[in-house]
Image: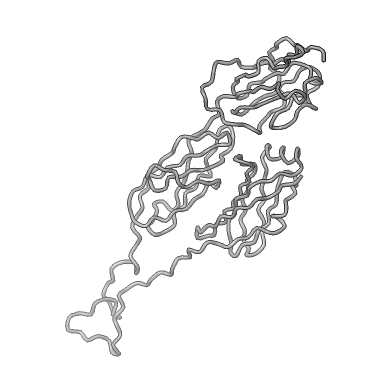
Amino acid sequence: MRPVARRVRRSTAVGAAIAAGAVAFTAAVPAHAADRTVTFADDGDTRNYTPSAVTINPGDTVTFSGSFKDHPLVWPSGDFSREATGDSRTYAFPRGGTYAFLCDFHPNMLGTVVVAGNKTAAPVFAVSPDPPTAGAVTTFDAGATRDPDGTVSTYEWDLDGDGRFETKGASPTVTRTYASAGTIKVGLRYVDDGHDTSAVTTREITVSTAPAPGGGTPVPGPGGGGTPPAGSTPPAGGATPPTGGTTPPARDRRAPTARVSAATTRGVKLVAGVARLGLTVDERSTVTANVRRGAVVVGRGTAKLTRVGAGAVKVKLTAAGLRAVRQKGRVSVALTLVVRDAAGNARTLRRQLTLKK
């Protein structure tokens, strides 16, 4: 093979964006240029990239200069060698992370691009009812939280104010029933798709005492609605005078029953980038769906099921999820479904699914 060498060039062109396969980078970051160029060097026995490691900021580019015919470029997030023709190709890196690359012909010829500066934001959440009541379900909703340069993978809650974030999950909504009145400092943080953890947002909530059964103190009046006056005779027949008020009906605390359809578990074919997941429920419910590939959320969906029985929730895939399915034909993913009824009771289902193009 003839030696290949190319002069280092700076480029401001933006090539194909690479958004999948990122690994969070948390070590100290050295000084770096805005846009970088990597050349292919081949002197016979030694084949390498120069430089073999570059560090850039999100949105910067790296230009690869060399013969792609002699050294096809391969990424863990996909093989772009068929797109990279001639002797130059520029890629943009919009997301923080560490991206490995190598030559398809020479596995020892490899390198990395480190994209510094993955960003997170302070999460936000709402409390309902506000203020909460002891003995009743309180709902915490972080649905308004947004990651500035990606997506939220996991919500982590400290619901008892002890400083530990024991409640974790992909759903932005959780519930808690407090046994007694008091003031509690609730905390929320999240982990994004770049594996970075956000700052903690805390909020003090005051849990009020539940009202006494009967609605309060009985007031004497006609008909025996209280304690009979001194010297009076109780009603005939030995009946006990009413004490006032009525006992409210017991609250429904049963979580809805739900089941993922057999057709869905066998595999779901994408239509216009959307996966339709079938399920059955035994009461009207709101369904929230999250689809993960490894640690990365690649799809989300929400549906209100207004009828008992069969229904469906549509999950829209992210760009990374669509790319994975199109490249591989079929991809195994982890599905999490949270089914919540009108009373706030929730049931969580987890299944392993196959998405097909």
Q: Residue at x 79, y 17 (%)?
A: 67
Residue 238 falls left or right of residue 97: left
Q: Is residue 312 above or below residue 293?
A: below
Q: Residue at x 73, y 13 (%)?
A: 41
Q: Is residue 329 above or below residue 115?
A: below
Tell me which corner region of the image, top left, top right, bottom left or bottom right, holds residue 57.
Answer: top right
Quadrant in which the C terminus is drawn? top right
Residue 282 falls left or right of residue 265: left
Residue 42 falls left or right of residue 94: right
Residue 172 falls left or right of residue 1: left
Residue 251 is situated, as x and y percent measured from the top left of the image, at: 45, 65
Image color mode: one colour
Quadrant in which the N terminus is drawn? top right
Tell me which corner region of the image, top left, top right, bottom left or bottom right, holds residue 66.
Answer: top right
Q: Residue at x 57, y 31 (%)?
A: 24
Residue 133 is situated, as x and y percent measured from the top left of the image, at: 38, 56
Q: Is residue 82 above or below residue 311?
A: above
Tell me which corner region of the image, top left, top right, bottom left or bottom right, holds residue 15.
Answer: top right
Q: How many marks?
A: 0
Residue 117 is situated, as x and y percent measured from the top left of the image, at: 55, 25
Going by the picture, which residue comes out furthest to the left? 231
Going by the picture, which residue comes out furthest to the top? 7
Nearer to the camera, 278 or 344: 278
